Amino acid sequence: MRIIVTAALSALAMMLAGPSATAQDAAAPAGAAAPVAGAAQAPAAALPKQPVPYTQLRPKPAVKPRPAAARPAAAAAAAVGAVATGPAVAGAIPVAAGAAPAVAGARLAPGQPLPPAELETFIDGVVKDAMGREHIAGVTVSVVQNGQVVLKKGYGFASLNPQRAVDPDRTLFRVASISKTFTWIALMKEVEAGRMRLNQPVNLYLPEKVQVKDQGYDQPVRVTNLMDHSPGFEDRALGQLFEDRASRVRPLDLYLRQERPRRVHAPGVISTYSNYGAALAGEAVSYTAGKPFERLIEDEILVPLGMTHTTFREPRPAKAGLPSPMPAALVADIALPVHWTRTGFEQRKYEYAGHVAPAASASSTAGDMARYMIMLLNGGQLNGVTIYGPTAAQAFRTPLRKTPAGINGWAHGFMTFDLPGGYRGYGHGGDTLDFHSSLVTVPALGLGIFISTNSETGAPLAGRFASRVVQQFYATPQVFPRAGSPELAANADAVTGYYLTSRRAYSGLEGFVTSVVGGTTVSVTPQGRLVTTSRDETRTWVPDGPLTDRLFIGTDGDRRIAFTNEGGQARAFLVSYGGALMERAAVWWRPTTLAWLGGLAGLASLATLGGIVFRNRREFRENQTQARASLVQNIQAVLWLIAMALLALWASKTGDVAYVVYRWPGALLLTASACALVASMLTIATLVALPAIWRGGRRVDSWSHLRKAGFTLTVLIYASLAVVLALWGALSPWSG
């Protein structure tokens, strides 16, 4: 059972924007605002290292700038004398790298710019190696530093039919959740304008039909809860987050009403990544500003920045009630998803996400993202145009949540990254089914790094890319793997166990599936290394500091996890991206428990049906109650076997995650769930009949004690499986 369910469903983990205007908005503007020449660069403000209350983020009059921290003479000289290289963004204001300590043994000091030729050679090697080894069809990359583009480059193919090469200035890649950074900028602009407040309930800024329901919780969901992903929503995606047919795209407000998730935690308690929460924030911004979301982003961000090849619109026919589709001039340049199979690359359909546009629908080029990163590094300014002010600039580098070192604390929606050399990065990752992207800015280095891939196998490359660049040029060379801890080996029982993610559906068939694939097994090797084994990867860790701190760093990188203790035992651990809490699971939440019960139920079903054929004549003696109970148990056996066979057939089709997402839940899984539900309900009848079965009658018209024992054992096995399946949500064919 575990092999069938876990192996086949493991692919689900990889989950975890024209012509004439429509009724909702006018056509997208075509031009960019003219730059303001000669604008002066304001000195960068010192940024706090700890969370700052919202009331302290408001701009105050007559604030005197702090004197810049002194830099070593050599570093200062390098910064002043550096000559800009590479294609500059027209009109961009050079960005000071900011004070940062020199890292002993690093190739470059913080004030020294990247050498373009060496950078290109290094990135060529990293990208081409990954493309060949991990079967990635196309990659687009841009690197900026000190207000200039150091590198823009495309690799491989944007599409297979027709075959088009990746052009870093023209090819639009889906940047997925990097879309959220535009949403947070738009939200902070509303805050700076005084139309929204971060500490107020989000319902104040939402139309009544999409307002968050109480669902038994006293505390309202506030705007900040959306920005740090702590509204308390469960996470659902299957069958609704991405679509492969334009006809299934819905207006944002309709999506928010129809796909409303359950609230499973009080607001602010746990940070659990929520696409729905980000979409809700986008709706709030749109409602407050009085503009459709796509038009708002164009007017307030894209057009002023000259990002002419970036859009939240999608290539589809115009339809009343929906935003205008993507302009035809951009449609010809979109990259399409490419899937690797055993026989080679296979082009897939376009991934639609317009119904959750604020969370996922942006498409952009490496060139446009270079402009965007320079603006972020420059505190909201580019070409003399101000996109946002000092309040937002400070917020985007101020974590909302106090977290252990190396754990993302959500800088008002932006992810924080602990990079090699002790540098702090800000940005976001983005993943659709096939596109995987990463945007990281490093203010201390004046550095911005963007990458996007169009193959589902591109996630590892995108995830490690920024760290690889910083490690190569600005960090001390590391010796890997890091050594284990004898103390950890001696105290392994405190952390070992099975942990279940908080980022999952909590009911229904999606709850069942995400519970199966959403866990991590933690073990400790005799050499003192912590091992985490999840659905799609195994990683090793060692203590980062005293073992009592329960902070661990990867043996071959800078990623970290942090455990929380209760009574000397680990209760949960936080993952580095800060979007999930892995909670220690009780025995009934472990896939091994489900696997054992499923296996026993399968054997019991086969034995029950086998008894019809192989039981001798004397064993057929039975009273009326026993005869009826036997019939019921035979029906149960057939139903359990049908359910398992259908589940196995469904599992055989899930090698491609797109099948699961786009065809969810499908007739096979629904029928399997329905059969399991009926079989579980019949268990109630057999449980009630047990006393009468054992009372029996005279030996000549009653079962033997052995058959009674076998019947009872089968009833208990079926009942145990039914309870666990009900708890996991597998007996809810109506809920999907």
Image (cartoon, grey):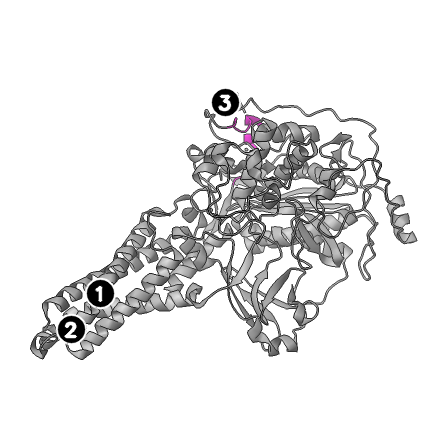
The image quarter in which residue 460 lies: bottom right
| Secondary-structure class at tag 2 | helix
In percent of width and height, residue 513 lies at 42, 55
Mark 2 or mark 1: whose residue is earlier in sequence: 2
Span shown in magenta: 323-336
Q: Nearer the viewer, residue 609 or 317?
A: 609
Q: Is residue 156 visible?
A: no
Q: Nearer the viewer, mark 2 or mark 3?
A: 3
Percent across and percent down for residue 691 are 20, 71
Q: Is residue 698 magenta?
A: no
Q: Which residue is mark 2?
A: 614
- Residue depicted at x 71% and y 42%: 55
Between discs 2 and 3, the one toward the N terminus: 3
Q: Circle 1 is placed at which residue position?
A: 688
Question: Of helix, strand and loop, which one carries label 3?
Answer: loop
Q: Which residue is mark 3?
A: 22
